[in-house]
Every structure is written in C-alpha cells, then in structure tokens.
Image (cartoon, rainbow, N blue to C red):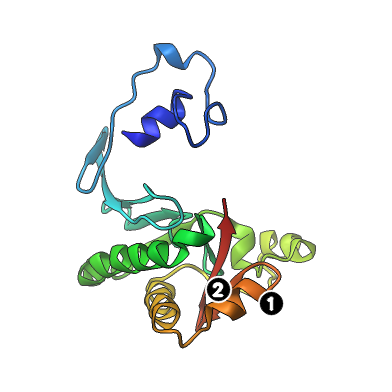
Amino acid sequence: KDDIALMRGKSDVFPATFRYPNNSHTEFIPIEEGTKIHLGNIDVEVWELSGHTAHSVVFVDRSHKCIFTGDAIGSGYIVLLICSEEHAMETVEQYRESLMKITPRMSELKNFAWLGGHGIQENGCDPRHQQDYLAGESQYFNPIRQQVMLDMICLCNNLISGKISWKSVIDSPEHYCNTGSAGIFFHFI
C-alpha cells in the first residue's frame, strides 16, 4: 500500500519521483507474500524479500521454472540496500530475516533459472566488458543462484556480528562489503 502511494506521487519519501502519466485512471492492486498473479495459463507467485527496498518482492514462475529476483538479491554481484545510515543495521537484519524465510523453500527452486535485475552485474559491473557479456564471451560470470542467496545470509550475519566492521563499510568508497559470492553496497538516504 505504501508503494501505491509512491506510484500516485502521494508519499512523503519521494513525492513526485514515481508519478506515471495518467495514473489517476490506473487501478493499483496491492500484492503481498503469497499473492498469485494469473497470466493466462501461467500463475506467478509473489514472495516478499525486503531489503533492497522496504517492499521488494520476487516472482516465482513454476511453469517455466524461473524466479525473477529483480534487485532483491542483485544479479550475482551485489545487492544495493537503500536506507538511512542510522537504520542500516536494522535494514541488514530485516534483509537477513527475509532471506531466511526463503531458505526452507530452496528445494522447490531446484533447477530454476534465477533472473536478476541487471545483466551487467553478472559481468562484474564493468561497463568496458558489457559487450563481452552480451556476446557470451565474458571472462567473469557470477549468475544469481541459490549459493549467492546463502552467501548473502552469511554476509548479513558477518555484519550483524561485527565480523565485518561497520567502520570498514563506512570508510570504503562505495560503502561496500562482501562474503563469498555476495556483496552489499549501501546507498544512504
């Protein structure tokens, strides 16, 4: 419901950023954990995965064995957590809890394609090599997959426990930290 306010431009957070043309004639229907979106012969299920933003979701298409993670887990390189510096650890804890809710479902996702938000992230975020990625000749490839999600949980645990110092994150040029195949950039608002 908060996102609907954003779409209508009636939010204190981003008052006019997300206004769409003629949206006064558009009906917005809230989606939440477990919502099924019927697309003809295909049902897509919504799983909540807050962290990247407060209301991030992933979409599970069992018919085609695909999970669309968007930016909720990133694209195999990083996830961008957008929050205030003051609430960063709270955001990390919420993100970890959201990830933990999905782990019992991991067996359901066996042999699923994990489709993230940005292909360039799978190529190490280096725009000089994007053409290599598009041509299938990339030397770097870290697709979003179950291991990235498990490493993301470990990364959150490392931040929460202090194994990764918050000072090192704040002092890094892009407020970055990583563990295994997972990384987090913080964007402070």
Q: Secondary structure at mark 2?
A: loop
Residue at image mark 2: 142
Query: Which residue is at 35% across, 68% downward?
Result: 93
Which percent across, then down, holds residue 161? Answer: 39, 84
Which quadrant of the rendered structure holds the N terminus? top left
- Give the number of the disc on residue 139: 1
Q: Which amino acid lies under the numbered mark 2 shown in the image of this protein?
A: Asn
Q: Which amino acid lies under the numbered mark 1 shown in the image of this protein?
A: Gln
Determine whether label 2 and label 1 are within 8 Å by CB: no
- Against 19, residue 161 (above or below) is below
In the orientation shown, which residue stands out farthest toward the right?
Answer: 128
**What is the CA distance from the residue labelled 2 to the residue labelled 1?**
10 Å
Tell me the crowding category of disc 1: few under 14, some 14 to 19, or many 20 or more residues within 10 angstroms, Cα based: few
Query: Which residue is at 55% across, 26% downward?
Result: 16
Query: Which residue is at 37% across, 63% downward?
Result: 95
**From the viewer's perspective, is 141 left or right of 94?**
right
Image quarter of residue 98: bottom left
Which percent across, then down, holds residue 75? Answer: 52, 62
- Against 2, residue 71 (above or below) is below
Which one is nearer the viewer's eye here, 72 or 42? 72
Query: Which residue is at 47% across, 63% downward?
Result: 88
